[in-house]
Image (spheres, rainbow, N blue to C red):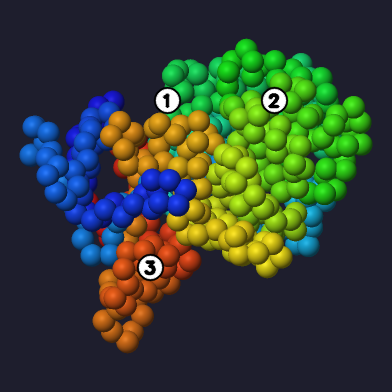
């Protein structure tokens, strides 16, 4: 359906590269009827093309700016009710204590509908325009998640979880054959609602190597080769998990080698966590051009470890950020950006200051980096002509001019002398969803905070 053309005027901030955060004041972006950026004018000699003078204009003033939508490269939609619930558990006991009982309840589509509508609405309200979702083993509920994402307008990769061992009998695939058949069913459903996978894409999803027999991993690898679809799974999250992989796959040289042997280590593969990769594994992943989703909040919450992101970046690996709800305590990608910065500082306490990430780098991982991880770097993650208008309006509140606090504006406070670089840093470290005023995906308005007029 064609959209109304619009012009967006004000301050635009986005990542040009890992270390270059461009801040452009008094710019204009024209978005066409297909939701794509048609032109950009910056202060100076730039001129808008003919025919745009009478187009509806959305103009920002004061402490507001346009920023690309966040890209969550790893989130378990079905675990959303458990966000913040993990006790003192670590990965393997957390799965059995909290996760499998919750996920198994999604055999009831009424439960699935309530949770999935909530998590999609919540992440959109937090500025997440693209999400890589793990669903459950249930075909109807997985298809429902795809339907909800499409209806609400969120760009999403939706994966039916494959697992035929290492889980309760009441919650696992019956066989390799049933896992593949049910995965094909979900692929067919998504193709029926979005034939070109323009907004919603299926994604092949073995939960992690220990949860799948060798034959199932190989069959999923063959399915990937047949369909050329993306893949998402977990790797080297926890040392006990790595030991379990070595026990279950004694013929494999490493955890990464298990996936490589199965044909699941591809340029379209997203590997979550990657906390404890060996040098050989990092080289193998790079040689296959597979991607990594860094999940700092989850890695901390269930005490999996500290991923050394600087080393991974220096070695040329492609990295984005993932909230990993509900191992991670929040679905907010802004919070995850903050966690990435703080975890890098913990690494620096033992490895030196070079390990620290800068605000500019963390924001890159949350946008451009995530776009590369999901294979959409030419479409989303920044503001360039020809890209889709996946964007958010960030409002930092009015400049402080009173002794009283307006709690509706959130925790972030601007005192008037901060340059834009410091305003952005304050947003990253003290902001929340109250600063997300409006969100668009492919030109469609999908969220607007009450009281904000456009």
Residue 180 image position (x, y, % from top left): 70, 18
- Residue at 14% across / 42% down in the picture? 46
- Judge by depth and name the residue closer to the eye, 247 or 251: 251
Q: Quadrant of residue 316?
A: top right
Q: CA distance from mark 3 to mark 2?
A: 42 Å
On residue 422, the disc is: 3
**Classed neighbour count for the residue bearing mark 3: other residues with Cα under 10 Å, few (<14), some (14–19), many (≥20):** few
Q: Nearer the viewer, mark 3 or mark 2?
A: 3
- Residue at 51% across / 27% down in the picture? 201
Quadrant including the N terminus:
top left
- Judge by depth and name the residue closer to the eye, 292 or 163: 292
> Which residue occupies the extreme bottom position in the image?
403
Q: CA distance from mark 1 to mark 3?
A: 37 Å
On residue 198, the disc is: 1
Q: Quadrant of residue 187?
A: top right
Q: Nearer the viewer, mark 1 or mark 2?
A: 2
- Residue at 52% across / 23% down in the picture? 190
- Judge by depth and name the residue closer to the eye, 347 or 144: 347
On residue 128, the disc is: none
> Which residue occupies the extreme top position in the image?
226
In the image: residue 384, left or right of residue 349: left
**Classed neighbour count for the residue bearing mark 1: other residues with Cα under 10 Å, few (<14), some (14–19), many (≥20):** few
On residue 264, the disc is: 2
In the image: residue 178, left or right of residue 326: right
Precedes in sequence: disc 3 or disc 2:
2
């Amino acid at each position: 359906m064609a959209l109304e053309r619009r012009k967006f005027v004000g301050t635009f901030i986005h990542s040009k590269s890992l270390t270059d955060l461009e801040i452009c004041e008094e710019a204009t972006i024209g978005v066409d009827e297909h939701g794509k950026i048609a032109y950009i004018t910056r202060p100076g000699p730039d001129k808008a093309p003919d025919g745009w003078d009478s187009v509806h204009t959305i103009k920002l003033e004061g402490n507001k700016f346009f920023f690309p939508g966040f890209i969550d490269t790893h989130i378990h939609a079905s675990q959303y009710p458990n966000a913040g619930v993990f006790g003192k558990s670590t990965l393997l006991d957390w799965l059995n204590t909290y996760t499998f009982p919750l996920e198994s309840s999604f055999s009831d589509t009424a439960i699935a509908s309530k949770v999935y509508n909530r998590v999609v609405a919540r992440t959109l309200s937090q500025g997440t325009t693209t999400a890589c979702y793990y669903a459950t083993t249930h075909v109807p509920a997985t298809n429902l998640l795809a339907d909800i994402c499409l209806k609400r307008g969120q760009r999403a990769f939706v994966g039916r979880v494959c697992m035929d061992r290492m889980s309760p009998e009441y919650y696992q695939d019956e066989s390799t054959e049933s896992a593949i058949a049910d995965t094909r069913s979900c692929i067919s459903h998504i193709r029926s609602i979005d034939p070109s996978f323009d907004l919603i894409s299926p994604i092949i999803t073995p939960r992690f190597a220990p949860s799948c027999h060798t034959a199932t991993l190989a069959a999923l690898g063959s399915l990937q080769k047949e369909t050329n679809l993306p893949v998402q799974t977990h790797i080297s999250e926890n040392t006990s998990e790595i030991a379990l992989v070595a026990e279950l796959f004694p013929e494999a040289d490493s955890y990464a080698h298990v996936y490589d042997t199965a044909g699941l280590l591809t340029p379209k593969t997203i590997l979550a966590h990657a906390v404890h990769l060996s040098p050989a594994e990092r080289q193998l992943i790079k040689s296959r051009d597979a991607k990594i989703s860094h999940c700092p909040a989850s890695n901390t919450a269930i005490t999996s470890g500290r991923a050394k992101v600087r080393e991974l970046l220096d070695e040329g690996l492609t990295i984005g950020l993932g909230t990993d709800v509900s191992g991670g305590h929040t679905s907010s990608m802004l919070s995850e950006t903050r966690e990435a910065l703080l975890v890098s500082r913990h690494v620096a306490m033992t490895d030196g200051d070079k390990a620290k990430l800068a605000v500019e780098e963390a924001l890159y991982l949350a946008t451009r980096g995530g776009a590369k991880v999901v294979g959409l770097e030419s479409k989303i993650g920044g503001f360039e002509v020809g890209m889709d208008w996946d964007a958010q309006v960030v409002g930092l509140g009015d400049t402080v001019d009173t002794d009283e606090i307006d709690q509706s504006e959130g925790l972030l406070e601007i005192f008037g002398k901060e340059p834009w670089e410091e305003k952005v840093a304050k947003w990253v470290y003290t902001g929340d969803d109250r600063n997300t005023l409006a969100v668009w995906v492919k030109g469609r308005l999908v969220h607007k905070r009450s009281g904000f007029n456009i």
